[in-house]
Amino acid sequence: MTKSVAIVTLGCKTNQFESAAMVEQLRLAGYQQVSFDSGAELVIVNTCTVTAATDSQSRKLIRRAQRLNPQSKIVVTGCYAQIDPQTLSQMLGVSLVIGNQEKRQLLELLTDNNSVGQVVVSDIRKTKTIEPLPLTGYEQRSRAFIQIQNGCDAFCAYCIIPYARGRSRSIPAADIVKQVKEMSLNGYAEVVLTGIHIGNWGRDFEPKSEMRELVKQIAASNFSGRLRLGSIEPVELSKDLYRYVLDSDWICPHFHIPLQSGSDTVLQRMNRHYSTAFFADLLADISNTRCDVAIGLDVITGFPGETAAEFETTCQFLESLPFSHLHVFPFSKRTGTPAATMPDQVPGAIIKERAALLREIGERKYLQFIQRFIGETLELVIEGGEANGYRKGLSDNYISVLVPACLADPGDLLRVKVVGLSNGDLIGEVVSL
């Protein structure tokens, strides 16, 4: 008899990849994936713990799953489960809590689990290697994400992730290349390399390797799609790597580079090992090398001790930078991190106000960037979902364009001429199918 399973995923692309791999395990074992609201027999909540808000969201999802079907077996995993499994195991309806390292053993653990609130979470900081999770495709996705690395050794003052994901561990290049080729053969026009700290890929090997060598091996494999790199720390984005990317017509001209603050004093308190001058020079060289490149930044506001002057410095610095996308994160105190006990914690109301101001800067920068492409022809990967007769497509330089749904199916790779702007969205006409 077929059993039903629903999975809900919070947080990063790594979590999304791991959720897809778990679902594939379950489908092969005879489970049928259904929507979360259908009250499945098995519900998996793959949690995030980057902020207190994501912790709260995870708990709400668990309670909702239990209300939808009090008889369902609820499995909780992910970073919140790794950090605080006991709290989650005591929630009504939770049958099993497993750590990030145990995701690959999901089927075995489900078979062995006959209790309520069972916890199977290992000490991930002791894990020195990583085995790639098998995955051949994604349900309802037009782009494929491939995990190349896990863990982080940076220990930024605000971040809990090194404790939730363990030390940096790289997947061998041969395994990555094989999976990239499989995803391409399975019809994915774009493959995204993802991980927790991908700029650190290969540094745990003997001898050490680096991202540019991995990308060159993918090129040598006759991969026929387009490749996108996930988030890379500024100190790990070498000139050799970004110049190679920008000179390649098959790698997306798009970089996601965490900034976190535009104030040198705040960066020092954050334990971020670069200056704003270094960051500005990096972005200037990237944007001068290729004018259509998209550059996305992360910034945190409300870090302990952030003064009005330091915040204003960040605003002015952002205004001066050539970027296209801005992700704003209000500071969230994470127990166990140095920032949680720092003096001069910024009041929540001030953090909220500053985050709104930063988002205004980001919206203005994005609008300035995309307006440059009106009249241009872009190649889009069409994504799922339809609204008001349009589907959204994503260009290689990370621009969203709306195209008529009747001419675009999810997963299609289309050339589209951008003909206008409506309510903040670019509108395109298909010029080739």
Image: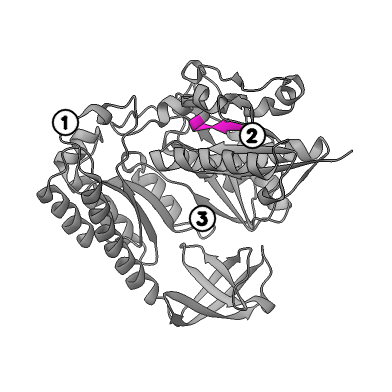
Q: Quadrant of residue 98?
A: top right
Rate crowding at label 3 as few (under 14), some (14 to 19) or many (20 or more) other CA atoms within 10 Å.
many
| Disc 3 secondary structure class | loop
Determine whether the residue tagged by mark 1 lies in a helix, strand or loop: loop
Number of numbered discs visible in the structure rendering: 3
Q: Which mark is residue 175?
A: 2
- Earlier along the polypeptide chain: callout 3 or callout 1? 3
In the rendered image, residue 298, in percent from the top left (x then y), is placed at: 34, 49
The correct choice, above or below, for 352 with respect to 204 in the image is below
Whole-number angstrom distance, CA of label 3 to CA of label 1:
44 Å
Q: Quadrant of residue 61?
A: top right
First along the sequence among labels 2 and 3:
2
Could you tell whether 234 is left or right of 53 in the image?
left
* 77 drawn magenta: yes
The rendered magenta stretch, by its main secondary structure, is classed as strand
In the image as oriented, which residue stretches furthest toward the right? 1
Q: Which residues are magenta?
A: 76-80
Nearer to the camera, 209 or 12: 12
Q: Amino acid at mark 2?
A: Asp
Any part of residue 49 in sight? yes
Foreground label between 3 and 1: 1
Tell me if residue 413 is in the magenta stretch: no
Question: Which residue is label 1 attached to?
Answer: 343
**Residue 81, disc:** none
Q: Residue at x 14, y 54 (%)?
A: 312
Residue 413, position as x, y percentages in the image: 63, 67
Q: Is residue 190 left or right of residue 341?
A: right
Residue 48 position within the rendered picture, expressed as x and y whole percent measured from the top left: 48, 38
Image point (51%, 72%), residue name? 401
x, y percent for residue 249: 51, 60
**Residue name at image x 51 percent, y 55 percent:** 251
Q: Kindly state the secondary structure of the residue where label 2 is placed.
A: helix
